[in-house]
Image (spheres, rainbow, N blue to C red):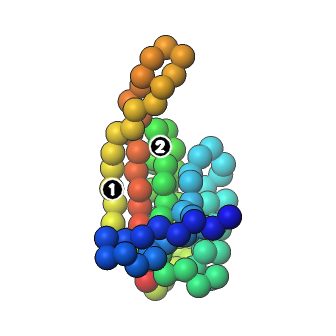
Amino acid sequence: MRVSLLDPQGRHSMTDDNIIYVGNKPVMNYVLAVVTQFNNGADEVLIKARGRAISRAVDVEQIAINRFLSDVMTKKIETSTESLSTETGNTNVSAIEITVGK
């Protein structure tokens, strides 16, 4: 299923296929996903992570643009705090979104 997101001007800006959610897998798995998105014609890729995976997301971005994608640059970095419901109550978790594009 492909969901398109609208930018503030109402244009289609990104699909959910262009979003990479970074978790506990090895860094190179995510780097390969980013490179694959650009090789398939994407103009932008959004790298998202929460909590302990934030440093891994930064590594993914740096490795992808410094080693594999010379025509791609970091466009935007956003940080936030998300509130998650757990068994013991609400917990705040840091999050990051890194947009890379041509």
Residue 94 placement: quadrant = top left
Amino acid on which the number 1 mark rests in the picture: Glu
Q: Is residue 102 above or below residue 19?
A: below
Q: Is residue 7 above or below residue 39?
A: above
Tell me how far mark 2 sits from mark 1, CA to CA. 12 Å
Near-viewer residue (68 or 42): 42
Picture disc at residue 17: none
Residues packed near mark 1 inside 10 Å, few (<14), some (14 to 19) or many (20 plus): few
Q: Position of residue 71 (x, y in %)?
A: 46, 85
Residue 92 placement: quadrant = top left
Which residue is located at x 40 percent, y 78 percent? Answer: 11
| Quadrant of the rendering where the N terminus is positioned | bottom right
Amino acid on which the number 2 mark rests in the picture: Arg
Which residue is located at x 35 percent, y 39 percent? Answer: 81
Q: Which residue is under mark 2?
A: 50
Count every numbered label the image shows and give the total.
2
Q: Is residue 21 left or right of residue 66?
A: right
Residues packed near mark 2 inside 10 Å, few (<14), some (14 to 19) or many (20 plus): many
Near-viewer residue (6 or 66): 6
Q: Is residue 90 left or right of residue 39?
A: left
Q: Which residue is under mark 1?
A: 78
Q: Secondary structure at mark 1?
A: strand
Q: Position of residue 76 (x, y in %)?
A: 33, 66
Q: Secondary structure at mark 2?
A: strand
Which residue is located at x 42 percent, y 70 percent? Answer: 6
Q: Position of residue 37 (x, y in %)?
A: 60, 75
